[in-house]
Image (cartoon, rainbow, N blue to C red):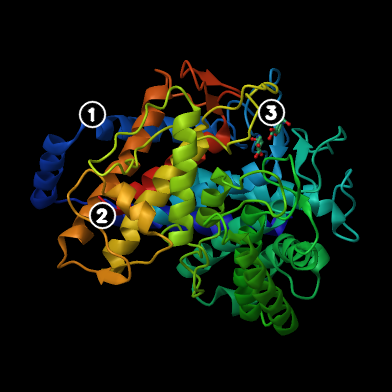
Amino acid sequence: MAPLILPFVFLAYLVLYSIALSIPTIPNFLSVGRAQQQQVLKSPLDTWIEQQERIALDKLLANVSPGGRNVKDAAKGSVIASPSREHPNYFYQWVRDAAITTSTLVDLYTDEPSSKLSSDLSNILDDYSDLQYKLQRTSNPSGTFDDLSGLGEPKFEADGSPFIGSWGRPQRDGPPLRALTLMTYLRAYNESHPGLWTSAGAEDWYKDLYDPSLPANSIIKADLEYTSHFWNQSGFDLWEEVDGFHFFTAMVQLKALREGAELAKAFQDKGAAQWYAEQASYVEAFLQQFWDERSGFLVETLNTDRTGLDCALLLGSLHGYPSKYSHDTPVFPPYSEEILISFLRLVQDQQERFPINAAPSSSEDGVAALEGIGIGRYPEDVYDGYGNDKRGGNPWFLCTASAAEVLYRTADHLISTGNLEISPIGIRFYEALLSSSSLEPEIDRSYGPSDALFHSVIERLRNTGDEFIDVIKTHTDAQGSMSEQFDRVTGYERGARDLTWSYGAFLQAIRARKRVL
Ligand code: NOJ
Ligand code: NOJ
């Protein structure tokens, strides 16, 4: 894997170069004025967010090798789920958690290529890919690399050896998530080095990530092969409990196959490009089955006795949303009425379920308001962070953060398209959103910047998003630590401490918030 170091050396150069270019010698008085203005307008929530952003990134990186203070005795390149080694033991590397966290780091890098993070990031990605390459080829209870079945293994020991205890396996979201993280990175890198894929000198290093002729040698190609051959077989959900077919898994499979087809085309891997695109079209059609006409919302798992409402619907929509490098039409994007109505139903359930969530206020005509509250995984959940509690589960940081992100992304979409259409599917969502105003949304008409309702919707989306963030603020401790859950009665943190994914989900919600401010 030595050649893989090369791109990161380039990257480090690029970063240093751009820092050098951006050092201003003449102060820009206009921007100083603007900064002062912003200071004046800053709310307590804004101040907390700014500080918490830094803390969250620091605590996330503490769980990531190289450099992380909590991963000193884990394999090089590890991303552990949490430093907690007992009650519960989360000192493992889950393929899903690691891929999601690393993709947040890639996103932060592309937002601000000259930030301090960038120089660390090159090392992190180098070691992450190195270790993932090894994990892919490590035989484990899900299978081996030869027939790719081993790629469905959900978690490994912190030293990189297989985890042999009984577990909900295989889980088929890991390979597409990992492929997506690395594909986005490859795209971002290529963007700053146009033409690299075709220049002879660069061939060596990218082949470790994608080699058309030798899938056995490349990480992305192996994950795409796995995804394209196994998406039509059942597996365990992201919560590791139910064997079946799941919305979250299918959404990330679709995204990986579509973007994989594009990548294959760019590498002249024509047969594969066609095969991935064809499988993607089947997954896209299959996804329609998750819309439950009878209940009027999406379900996370097909054919179960659960309601189907689940924060994984929000996560599927967010993680399945096409990257900025793709030209694909989004399927069930965060702003779609199918997602928004499922969001409303989930919020209504969780509001009543958890004592820390106060009852919603309602309007004169009795419409319950949509308010920011603590959100857990799903109504029937009994996992309390340590074991099972028959009385039920708790709100989770990462679910509450994704609720905020869905609303911010919806506001962002409306601002950029200038168009809001409301159909019978989504009307209840908009009624609940606007319940505190005198405006009444109407079905089958479209609203734009010349309508008062359009502006109210955007404002309410932003404010309700902030309410969810405010709930996170309330339950985050004074040091800025976020565990997995917070207690449904006392509000205190529960479950694995310093959960890497909690920090990542918070940072993603704040990224989305910045785009709509
Ligand atoms: C640990 C799993 O990771 C979690 O998702 C599950 O709910 C509990 N075990 C209980 O089975
Ligand atoms: C339990 C969650 O259910 C699962 O999604 C996650 O991968 C593990 N914890 C590790 O954070």
Residue that mark 3 sits on: 90
Position above or below: 356 against 347: above
> Looking at the picture, how far across and down is residue 418, in whole percent?
26, 68
Q: Secondary structure at mark 2?
A: helix
Residue 310 can be seen, yes or no: yes
Lower position in the chain sequence, tag 2 or tag 3: 3
| Quadrant location, ligand no. 2 | top right
Identify the residue at image location x=45%, y=40%: 347
Lower position in the chain sequence, tag 1 or tag 3: 1
| Residue type at the position of mark 3 | Tyr
Whole-number angstrom distance, CA of label 1 to CA of label 2 = 23 Å
| Quadrant the N terminus occupies | bottom right
Asked if the residues shown at circle 1 and circle 3 are in contact, with their CB atoms under 8 angstroms apart, the answer is: no
Judge from the rendering whether residue 405 lies leftward or rightward of residue 98; answer left or right.
left
Residue that mark 2 sits on: 457
Mark 3 crowdedness (10 Å alpha carbons): few <14, some 14-19, many ≥20: many
Judge from the rendering whether residue 163 lies leftward or rightward of residue 415; answer left or right.
right
As rendered, which of 269 and 390 lies closer to the eye? 390
Identify the residue at image location x=46%, y=19%: 491
Q: Quadrant of residue 368?
A: top left
